[in-house]
Amino acid sequence: MLDFLQLGIRKEINHTLKSLGIVAPTSIQEQTIPSVLEGKDIIAKAQTGTGKTLAFVLPILEKIDVHNSDVQALILTPTRELAQQISKEIKRMIENVEGIHVLAVYGGKDVEQQLKKLKGARHIVVATPGRLLDHIRRESIDLSTVKMLVLDEADQMLHMGFLPEVDDIIYETFSSRQTMLFSATIPEEIKSLAEKYMVEPEFIEVKAKKVTVEEVKQVVIETTDRRKQATLLHLIQEHRPFLAIIFCRTKIRVSKLHDALIANGYESDELHGDLSQSKREKAMKRFRDAKSQFLVATDVAARGLDVEGVTHVFNYDIPTDVESYVHRIGRTGRAGGDGVAFTFVAPKDLEFLRMIEKGIHQRLEIQVIKGVSIPDREDYQRVNSEQIKEKKRSEGRRREGRNATAPSSSKKPNNSRPKSNSSTSTRSRKHTR
């Protein structure tokens, strides 16, 4: 296997890599770095946790001209968290390199501060589509000098509806730029985008035996919506995670579960789209520093969230597509470490479970926590039997009540024409009402 020096990465950056414990390139890095250094357009298909961020960051750093203050590289990401992570990774790589400047541009940050920073030398811009378009309309950034363009997590940008914005942004860049597309999946819309903007791209794919991360133990817990919270608290007591991410489907459920964890004495933070950027950054810092044990989040945290030491992932609400499942559980078991992912499945979730199993080509282990995730079987049968008996008793009482108030057969109204006079007929009808 080649090392980073042999791949063309300078010794200063190689020294930084070694100080971080990165001594050998991953498969995606080994295949991608030489092609990027040669100036080729590439489409790289790789799952999360394969090291693809360094696969484009390292060769970009080699190609930056520090004597030119223009924006030379643009990295587009679907989420603020991923933009933050990539810019942080770049800053780590250039600790021993002088003259390279990077700026992260995303929503939630003060626009005026970003405007001031954009006036200086910014060789690399890492951005989310919405905020970048805002700066383009303000004419506060010029992308015509961009020579290297990266679309990271392209399938997620498609999923979030960003492709029209991406199209507008690409139009603003240097026409003969080098384009790199990284994605876990390559749907038809992404292929169309590649055909439109890329020149003879080299296709690189890192194949895995399984779609999911092999180091992650995956367990399905059979439960009900009503018993999810008690089941989670039981598993926390039993497994005692060092750091854990808990995924919920909605912001309301995130907040409710976060409050429940706090009430039970746990250090917890929440992460979802309704929080201000400062609160999101504060929550992430506390979690990264292990000051909070649990991060309760929506899928906004599933992509680009790379925190060392995450030992457990809990799918409190099962994801509704295979890709989300893969990215959620990919938050643990990273860098070769061990990890456990628990997925809570209620009866109504079985179709999603079958879809996930089919997508990952794997049958998942299903467990029942007797008396916790579902009622104790004997208790359940007893309660169910009592409920059935009570239902029968109630129906019996209702029938008796109806019989008690129902008129006797002798008092039924005579619908035939009366033979007596009208006064008798009227009295008869009144009596039977």
Image (cartoon, rainbow, N blue to C red):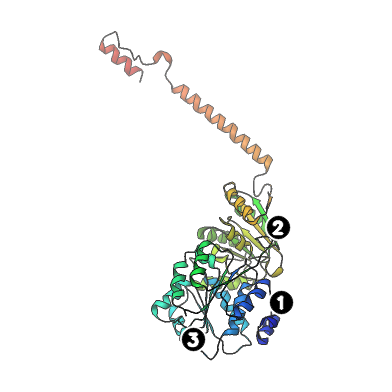
Query: How many angstroms separate mark 2 from mark 3 (CA)?
Result: 55 Å
**Residue type of the residue flagged with mark 3:** Asp
Q: Please tell me whether mark 2 or mark 1 is closer to you in this view.
A: 1
| Of residues 91 and 168, the one drawn nearer to the viewer in this rendering | 168
Image spot of residue 41 (x, y percent): 56, 75
| Residue 162, numbered label | none
Q: Do callouts 1 and 3 mark residues in contact (Cβ within 8 Å)?
A: no
* Marked residue nearer the N-terminal end (2 or 1): 1
**Residue type of the residue flagged with mark 1:** Ala
Q: Hey, which residue is sitting farthest left in the picture?
A: 422
Judge whether residue 230 can be spotted in this image. Answer: no
Instruction: Report the side of 271 relative to 412 (left or right).
Output: right
Per the image, the residue denoted by label 3 is 70
Quarter of the picture containing the N terminus is bottom right
Query: How many angstroms separate mark 1 from mark 3 (CA)?
Result: 32 Å
At horizontal 34% and vertical 15% (from top left) the residue drawn is: 415
Q: Is residue 109 above or below residue 427?
A: below
Label 1 element class: loop
Per the image, the residue denoted by label 2 is 238
At horizontal 44% and vertical 23% (from top left) the residue drawn is: 405
| Residue 24, numbered label | 1
| Of residues 346 and 228, the one drawn nearer to the viewer in this rendering | 346
Instruction: Report the side of 118 relative to 369 (left or right).
Output: left
